[in-house]
Image (tube, grey):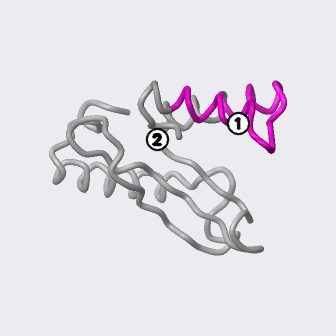
Amino acid sequence: MAFASASDHDALMQGLASGDEKLSRPALQKLEKTLERIRADRFEICADEMMTGVNTLAAPIFRDDNILAGVIAIIESVDSITEAPKPGQLTSLHAAAADLSGLLHSTAYVNWA
């Protein structure tokens, strides 16, 4: 959702604001701030969301400039991936995402940092 087109983003947010399990205004504002951070930092950590004791550190892969093509992630125990990412993990993850994005004809990571 962080890298959706403006029209897709708006439609998704509208759905969350008016769907069967409608999010409150403060929840929507919190989500928007999280998405802004993800767009700026190009990573997200999910702590204990998929399975207790397992964290995920993920970064976007782009194609043809800024079109989201996928995600690359490190999935490990909470001891290995902390909620504040280790600089080496983040650097390696971003390098891999940049390399893969480049192979897909994206310049999204060029001069980014």
Q: Earlier in the sequence, mark 1 or mark 2?
A: 1
Residue drawn at (54%, 38%), measured in percent from left and top? 38
Direction from residue 63 to residue 37 in the image, left or right? right
Query: Which residue is denoted by mark 1 in the rendering?
Result: 16
Q: Quick one: 71 or 17, which is closer to the camera?
A: 17
Residue drawn at (45%, 37%), measured in percent from left and top? 3
Q: Using the image, tell me which numbered label, if any, was put on residue 99.
A: none
Q: Position of residue 52 (x, y in %)?
A: 77, 73
- Amino acid type at circle 2 is Arg
Query: Which residue is denoted by mark 2 in the rendering?
Result: 42
| Residue 18 belongs to magenta span | yes
Q: Callout 1: helix, strand or loop? A: helix
- Distance from disc 1 to disc 2, alpha carbons, whole Å, reads 23 Å
Q: Quick one: 3 or 41, which is closer to the camera?
A: 3
Where is 1 relative to 79, above or below? above
Where is 9 relative to 80, above or below? above
Point out the image quarter for the C terminus: top left
Q: Callout 2: helix, strand or loop? A: loop
Residue drawn at (71%, 60%), measured in percent from left and top? 47
User: Of helix, strand and loop, which mostly describes the magenta segment?
Assistant: helix
Q: Quadrant of residue 50?
A: bottom right
Q: Quick one: 3 or 90, which is closer to the camera?
A: 3
Marks 1,2: beta carbons within 8 A:
no
Q: Position of residue 44 (x, y in %)?
A: 57, 48
Write down the region rendered in magenta: 9-32
